[in-house]
Image (cartoon, rainbow, N blue to C red):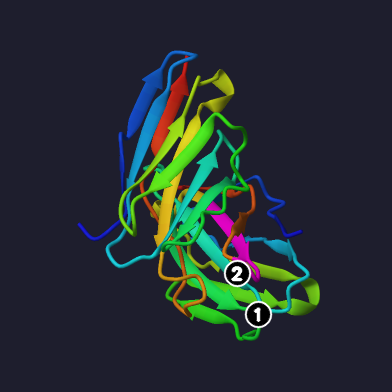
Amino acid sequence: AQKVTQAQTEISVVEKEDVTLDCVYETRDTTYYLFWYKQPPSGELVFLIRRNSFDEQNEISGRYSWNFQKSTSSFNFTITASQVVDSAVYFCALRGSNYKLTFGKGTLLTVNP
Amino acid sequence: GAGVSQSPSNKVTEKGKDVELRCDPISGHTALYWYRQRLGQGLEFLIYFQGNSAPDKSGLPSDRFSAERTGESVSTLTIQRTQQEDSAVYLCASSLAPRSPSNEQFFGPGTRLTVL
């Protein structure tokens, strides 16, 4: 069975602070994909990143960066110099050998001006 | 518009009525998924369609839920005899074939269903 745990239910920061959203996963598959999605107040899920299990290189995209560590089964997401527009619910998800995405319960990030 | 579209955006119904939710996937996407998101929760998988293969209905919570898809186009999710616990946002997603390297799912805006 697959499981994704996002232990942080809510995080509140002040603009320009850095913030890290944690994601821990469980799977028995040797090949799998990890995803992060953003859900702003409008409700639509926005795809942010996909990583496969064979690629442990960390990735940076502008103010966003992701730290994939297979040894701890974690795929954490950091936003540098947060902005009010970053306020949203962020979901981590796992796809194993089949096509189903297993989602965590999400972390509500509030960035205050 | 090139994204996944869903209709209606909001639906309020009375307990016991049937509802139909519609999803238009991205053109060329052979895979289509339905998810349910209850308030404050993550997404629960409901059903998956891939081309002309038999759908995976393993996530449907009861026999009151059913879905259809015509070829690789529109899908409808039907909930019969709605109950208050069916209140949720129903999200549709589409993707290229899941085994494709670019297999991320693109989501529609969802239908917010409220059962009174």
Q: Main secondary structure of the magenta part?
A: strand
Three-letter code, disc 1:
Ser
Does A59 appear above or below A5? below
Sooner in the amino-acid sequence: mark 2 or mark 1: 2
Q: Position of residue B32 (x, y in %)?
A: 43, 56
- When asked about the image quadrant of residue B110, the answer is top left
Q: Are marks 2 and 1 on the same chain?
A: yes
Is residue A40 among what the camera can see? no
Residue A53, labelled with which disc? 1
In the image, what residue type sits under mark 2?
Leu
* Chain letter behind tag 1: A
**Place of residue B91 in the rendered image (x, y in percent of width and height, measured from the top left):** 44, 45
Asked whether A52 or A41 is in front, the reply is: A52
Magenta span contains residue B64: no
A48 over A11 or under it: above or below: below
In the image, the segment drawn in magenta is A90-98
Please state if A51 lies on the left or on the right of A48 as rendered: right
Q: Is residue B66 above or below residue B102?
A: above
Distance Cα–Cα, label 2 vs label 1: 8 Å
Q: Which residue is mark 2?
A: A34
Circle 1 sits in a helix, a strand or a loop, which is it? loop
Are the residues at dot 2 and dot 1 in contact (C-beta closer than 8 Å)? yes
Q: Is residue A90 left or right of residue B77?
A: right
Q: Does A94 appear in magenta?
A: yes
